[in-house]
Amino acid sequence: MITVEGLQKTYGDFPAVVGSDFSVDRGEIFGIVGPNGAGKTTTLKMLAGLVDPSGGAATVAGHDAGDPEMRRSLGFLPEESPLYEDMTARSYLRFFADLYDVPREEARERTERTLDRLELEHRERRLGDTSKGMKRKVAIARSLVNDPDLLIYDEPASGLDPLTTNYVLEFTRELATQGKTVVFSAHNLYHVESVCDRVVIMNRGQIVARGSVEGIRADHGTTSYHVFTTCPLDGSEPTDDGRHLTVVDDMAAVDDLRSEATAAGGTVADIRTREPSLEELFLDIADRPLETDPRAEAVR
C-alpha cells in the first residue's frame, strides 16, 4: 500500500526528514511516533501529497504521493481540522461527498452509517455550536466520504475526552478489519501500543527504531522479573502485604533467589514478569545520542 525510500524534506538548510525508509501493508495500522519536531507531521503530509519531498520517493496506493489520482484513494485527517462552522454535520459531509462525485444516495447512507458508529448526535446543529469531540467525529467522517483504501490520521484523538478517545481508537480498529490501511501519529503512546501492528520511532528527522511493539521491546528493552519471597533476602524490599520484593534481569537470577529463600527458611511466593511499555521504550530511545545528526551539522 505504501513504500517509502530515502524520503527527505529540507526547509532551507533545516533537514525536517532525513532519508526515511519504510513500507506499510494493506489492512495494517501503522504508527509514526516521536517527540515534537521529530518530523512526524511532515512525513504524513508528504504521504498525503500535501508537501513535496526534497529527495527520495513515496509510492501510495500504486501512485506517486504527489499524483492527484492517489488522493481518490486517500482520507486525510490533520491534527488541526477547522470545519465550516455555519454548516451542519450532514450538510458539511454532503458538500465533501459532492467534491468526490459520490452519488447522493450512496453518500447519505455512508455518512449516516459512519455517524451512527461514531455516536454523533445533533447532526442538524450548526458545527460552530458543537463540542470539540463532535467536531473531531465529523472530521473523521469527512475522511471517509470517498470510501478510501488508505487513511492518514495526524493525532486523531488530540484533545478529546477519554470516552470520545475510546470511540476513535475502537473505530480505527474496525477500519482495519474492513481492509482499510491506517497510518497515524499520536503523542499518547498507550494509544499507539493498543492499536498499531507496527511502529516507527522518529527523532530529529530520522527513524531510530522500527517494527512491532514486541519487536522493538525485544531489540531495545529489558525484561525484568519481580520476585516476591516470604522472607527477607539481600537487596529485597518489604511490601505492604508482608512479602519481600527483589527485582532481577533473568531467570538464572530467579533460580538463585529461590535457592536463597529456601536456605533462609522461606519460599518464593510469586514471580511477575515486567516488560517496558512503548512509552518507556520511546523515552529511552529518544534520549540516546544519534550516530549522525544532520540537524546539528546544519546549524554549525
Image (cartoon, grey):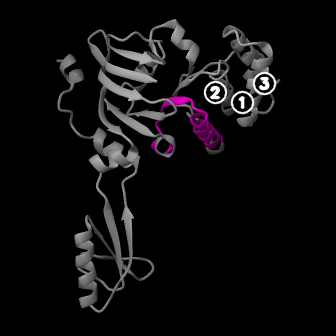
Depth check, mark 1 against mark 2: the one in front is 1
Residue 299 in view of the camera: no
182 or 125: nearer the viewer = 182
281 or 175: nearer the viewer = 175
Q: Is residue 253 above or below residue 267?
A: above
Depth check, mark 3 against mark 2: the one in front is 3
Please tell me how crowded label 3 is: few (under 14), some (14-19), or many (20+) other residues with Cα within 10 Å.
few
As shown in the figure, which amino acid type bears the numbered disc 2? Ile
As shown in the figure, which amino acid type bears the numbered disc 3? Glu
Label 2: which residue? 140
Seen at 58% across and 13% down, the residue is 72
As shown in the figure, which amino acid type bears the numbered disc 1? Thr
Label 1: which residue? 114
- Where residue 173 sits, quadrant-wise, is top right
Instruction: Find residue 33 and report its horizontal and vertical position in percent.
Output: 41, 34
State yes or no: discs 1 and 2 in contact (Cβ < 8 Å): yes
Seen at 39% across and 69% down, the residue is 272
Instruction: Find residue 220 and report its horizontal and vertical position in percent.
Output: 28, 47
Q: Is residue 194 above or below residue 13?
A: below
Q: Between marks 1 and 2, how big is the CA–CA gap? A: 9 Å
Q: Which mark is residue 109?
A: 3
Q: Between marks 3 and 1, how big is the CA–CA gap? A: 9 Å
Please tell me how crowded label 2 is: few (under 14), some (14-19), or many (20+) other residues with Cα within 10 Å.
many
Which numbered disc flags the more N-terminal residue, 3 or 1? 3
Indicate the secondary structure of the residue bearing disc 1.
Answer: helix
